[in-house]
């Protein structure tokens, strides 16, 4: 595999291979080894056209831990602002002998377009409303680490499904590993055609129903930056009907895991006490993100 562009195009075996490799990478992290030579003769560039804290930092940490030469392209100060096209930026990175480009872009499909036009491996760090494969991989890794496997688990993904690339990647990935997914959103935030090809998918408007008996509940941020107006009546009302609250989570399995890709908006899609509770895995997700990204960088550059 040259690139990692999404989970829709991967099969269960390929996903499991990444997760198994990430288990080995996590052992390295747990032992506090912050230098390996997995990528000692490789160079990695991060090219983020959209904001990011976790994804960009964890890719950069992963690349550095594994000994790669890292360049972090400051898009705001780069030639992109002088009108350079994505392909020309990609070709420049090729000419600089870049082995891997991690790209985040507001346009769905931009990483796929770049991948067709550069020699470097391309990793999708989030493209518009399409996919965010490494986020879903770290979510699956976190669930499998705790529960053993995804098979037969009830996973409720609640919030702004319409604008969420995290929901889409998890839908593809988790369903391939045998989880039963319920997507829950108000009608205005649920695309009509989502998951038509996914088995065991439930679409639910009522968040209490979605949470009932769930082994995993994932909250999604309201993607206000992608919304036109008028999709929700008010943030307060949204929180009441769709927010993850202690009361709502009482309906879930007693060992429910609470996940959120971050950044969280406390009091909107998740209450502060839920985000900070013992069964919240939000920080573990961040830690696991490094292991998963180490695995992906390793697998794509291995010759
Ligand atoms: N960090 C995730 C993303 O980039 C989720 C979010 O922004 O709400 O898609």
Image (spheres, helix red, strand yellow):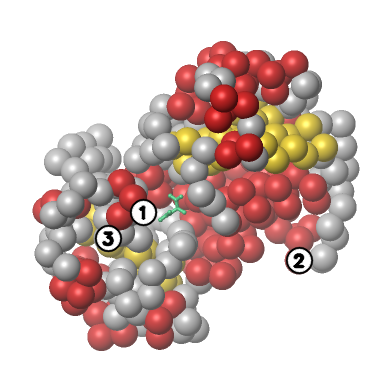
Where is mark 2, residue-wise? Answer: 30
| Residue 14 in view | no
Look at the numbered disc 3 and say if its residue's Cβ is closer than 8 Å to ligand 1. Answer: no
Determine the residue positioned at 70% across, 23% down.
93
Determine the residue positioned at 79% across, 58% down.
28
Pick whichever, 117 or 29, lies toward us. 117
> Considering only order in the chain, which callout, 1 or 2, is on the residue closer to the N terminus?
2
Determine the residue positioned at 40% across, 32% down.
107
Which residue is at the far front? 82
Pick whichever, 281 or 86, lies toward us. 86
Q: Is residue 90 left or right of residue 247?
A: right
- Against 2, is 71 above or below? below
Q: Is residue 153 left or right of residue 50?
A: left
Q: Secondary structure at mark 2?
A: helix
Relative image position of residue 173 (x, y in whole percent): 42, 44
Where is mark 3, residue-wise? Answer: 159
Is the residue marked by circle 1 packed among few (<14), some (14-19), or many (20+) residues within 10 Å?
many
Position of the N terminus, as image quadrant, is: top right
């Amino acid at each position: 595999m040259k690139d990692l562009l999404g989970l829709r195009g991967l099969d269960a075996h390929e996903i499991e291979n990444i997760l198994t490799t990430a288990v080995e990478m996590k052992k390295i992290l747990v032992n506090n080894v912050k230098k390996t030579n997995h990528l000692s003769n490789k160079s990695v560039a991060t090219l983020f056209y959209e904001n990011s804290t976790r994804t960009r930092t964890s890719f950069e940490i992963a690349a550095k831990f594994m000994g790669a030469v890292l360049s972090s392209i400051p898009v705001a100060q780069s030639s992109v602002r002088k009108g350079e096209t994505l392909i020309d930026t990609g070709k420049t990175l090729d000419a600089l002998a870049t082995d891997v480009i991690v790209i985040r872009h507001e346009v769905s499909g931009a990483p796929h377009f770049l991948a067709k036009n550069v020699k470097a491996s391309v990793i999708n760090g989030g493209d518009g409303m399409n996919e965010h494969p490494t986020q879903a991989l770290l979510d699956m890794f976190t669930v499998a680490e705790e529960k053993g496997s995804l098979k037969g688990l009830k996973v409720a993904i609640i919030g702004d499904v319409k604008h969420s690339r995290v929901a889409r990647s998890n839908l593809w990935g988790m369903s391939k590993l045998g989880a039963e997914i319920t997507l829950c959103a108000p009608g205005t935030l649920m695309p009509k055609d989502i998951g038509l090809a996914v088995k065991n998918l439930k679409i639910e408007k009522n968040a209490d129903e979605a949470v009932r008996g769930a082994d995993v509940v994932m909250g999604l941020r309201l993607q206000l930056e992608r919304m036109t107006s008028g999709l929700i009546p008010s943030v307060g009302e949204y929180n009441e009907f769709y927010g993850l609250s202690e009361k709502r989570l009482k309906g879930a399995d007693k060992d429910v895991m609470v996940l959120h890709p971050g950044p969280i908006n406390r009091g909107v899609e998740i209450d502060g006490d839920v985000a900070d509770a013992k069964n919240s895995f939000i920080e573990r997700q961040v830690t696991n993100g490094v292991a998963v990204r180490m695995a992906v960088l390793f697998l794509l550059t291995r010759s």
